[in-house]
């Protein structure tokens, strides 16, 4: 694949990281505004559109070119592996002396990869975009079992290699649902 004709990919290495993509040849950024005037898309919607366009460009540049209808979970995995070359997250190999250390004291030759959180968010946006663009949920390649397993493996590998655990966040019980009845009972008589 000729990477000079492929979209530029940037990523950030933060808790709310995402893979920012721009269509090949498109040098202007439309992250916060819409040229249609009346409609301003959210940051999420803009990102989803850019990701969708990038994946579409990937399919066009694929050898042989692929149509979306022939795209499978294996092609999505190929796309994710391709994006790794643009990653900014150091992932230590098991032979590295800093394996398992979140903040290594010195540089090492370990590869840079896309962060698991970035890939997970990207797949979520592409999965939604696929269905918004007429794809059926049961044929969505971004929801394929192989893609879910790959993301789980990347998470586990990066967790061990970087010494950072990816604990699933527990949902907090909505305290507002419990509080209002108690407040109503404590209200002085004459109010309400």
Image: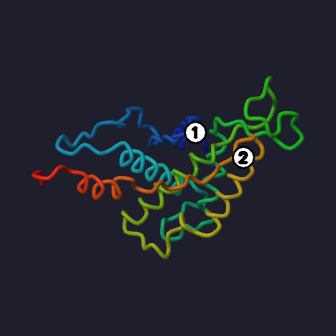
Q: Name the quarter where the C terminus is drawn.
A: bottom left
Farthest residue, direction bottom: 138
Where is residue 115 shown, x and y percent of the image? 63, 43
- The residue shown at (34%, 53%) is 176
| Outermost residue toward the front in this view | 189
Decide: is 135 above or below 23: below
| Residue 104 horizontal/vertical position (percent) | 78, 28
Query: Quarter-wise, where is residue 30 in the image?
Result: top left
> Which quarter of the picture shows residue 33?
top left
Q: What element carries label 1?
A: helix
**Residue 71 in the image, given as x and y percentages of width and height:** 54, 67
- What residue do we see at 44% from left, 43% from top? 23
Q: Which quadrant of the figure has residue 90?
A: top right
Q: Nearer the viewer, residue 66 or 47?
A: 47
Q: Which mark is residue 158?
A: 2
Instruction: Answer few, some or many: residues within 10 Å of disc 1's Cα (few below 14, many 20 plus, some between 14 and 19).
Output: few
Vertical order, 115 against 75 (above or below): above
> What is the distance, in whole Å, between disc 2 and disc 1 at their CAs?
29 Å
In the image, what residue occupies the spot 72% across and 53% down?
A: 156
User: What secondary structure is marked by label 2?
Assistant: helix
Determine whether, in the image, residue 169 is placed left or right of residue 128: right
In front here: 125 or 52?
125
Q: Nearer the viewer, residue 15 or 95?
A: 15
The residue under label 1 is: 4
Q: How does the figure colour the protein chain or chains?
A: rainbow
Q: Earlier in the sequence, mark 2 or mark 1?
A: 1
């Amino acid at each position: 694949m000729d990477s000079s004709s492929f979209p530029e990919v940037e990523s950030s290495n933060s808790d709310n990281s995402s893979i920012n993509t721009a269509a090949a040849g498109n040098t202007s950024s439309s992250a916060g505004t819409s040229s249609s005037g009346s409609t301003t898309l959210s940051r999420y919607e803009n990102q989803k559109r850019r990701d969708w366009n990038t994946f579409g460009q990937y399919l066009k540049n694929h050898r042989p070119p692929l149509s979306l209808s022939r795209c499978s979970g294996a092609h999505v995995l190929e796309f994710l592996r391709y994006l790794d070359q643009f990653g900014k997250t150091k992932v230590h190999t098991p032979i590295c002396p800093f394996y398992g250390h979140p903040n290594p004291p010195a540089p090492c030759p370990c590869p840079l990869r896309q962060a698991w959180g970035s890939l997970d968010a990207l797949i979520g946006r592409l999965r939604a975009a696929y269905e918004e663009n007429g794809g059926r949920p049961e044929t969505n390649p971004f929801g394929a079992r192989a893609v879910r397993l790959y993301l789980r493996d990347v998470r586990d590998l990066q967790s061990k290699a970087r010494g950072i655990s990816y604990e699933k966040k527990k949902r907090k019980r909505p305290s507002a649902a419990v509080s209002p009845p108690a407040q109503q009972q404590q209200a002085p008589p004459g109010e309400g």
